[in-house]
Image (tube, grey):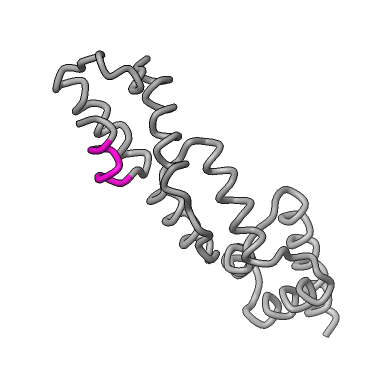
Amino acid sequence: MEEKEHELRQARHSLANMLARRDHSELELQQKLSLRYSQEIVETVLTEAKEKKWLSSPEELAERVSEQLHRKLKGRRYITQYLKKKGLPLPALCPEREQEKAQELLARHFQWDLSDSTQSLPLSEKQRAFHYLQRRGYEEALIRDLLF
């Protein structure tokens, strides 16, 4: 009995350390804790954390994570995939914002001004830009609208 109590204390300590570094989704915490502790201990610790309101709501956490990824100029596909992996719901994404981010990335990486309609870009440069944006999680239709 004393050994189980000791393991429970360790699991609580591990959970507190993880949450002190950054917010985690419940799925992330469960995956990380289950590497070291039994399923029973993990469920107990997560239940306690919910009761003590240590965990952010999934919607609130998804919104914050999504905003962080937007600031890093990640595309919609990347954000969606990342949130799914973390077990978080998908917030509404704005198509206009996606286009602005893609234009900013192109301006930074390729020094292009897409608002200048007189600027004609060679096909090879457009292809490089297409693949660059695609690897960053932007949708093909959006990229085509920007470049072609």
Callout count:
0
Classify the position of the N terminus by image quarter.
Answer: bottom right
Tell me which residue sits at (69%, 55%) in the image: 23
Name which quarter of the figure residue 133 lies in.
top left
On the image, the x and y values in percent for residue 112 come to 34, 17
Classify the position of the C terminus by image quarter.
Answer: top left
Residue nearest the observer in this picture, 122 or 38? 122
- Tell whether position 143 is magenta: yes
| First to last magenta residue range | 139-145
On the image, the x and y values in percent for residue 60 come to 66, 60
On the image, the x and y values in percent for residue 105 come to 41, 27
On the image, the x and y values in percent for residue 18 come to 71, 55
Name which quarter of the figure residue 114 lies in.
top left
Asked whether, in this view, residue 1 is left or right of residue 131, the answer is right
Tell me which residue sits at (70%, 50%) in the image: 22
Name which quarter of the figure residue 132 lies in.
top left
Q: Is residue 77 above or below residue 96?
A: below
Asked whether, in this view, residue 50 is left or right of residue 144, the answer is right
Q: Give the farthest residue toward the bottom.
A: 1
Residue nearest the observer in this picture, 55 or 71? 71
Tell me which residue sits at (48%, 36%) in the image: 73
Asked whether, in this view, residue 27 is left or right of residue 133, the answer is right
Tell me which residue sits at (78%, 80%) in the image: 4
- Tell whether position 64 is magenta: no
Q: Give the farthest residue toward the front.
A: 117
How would you classify the magenta stretch by its main secondary structure? helix
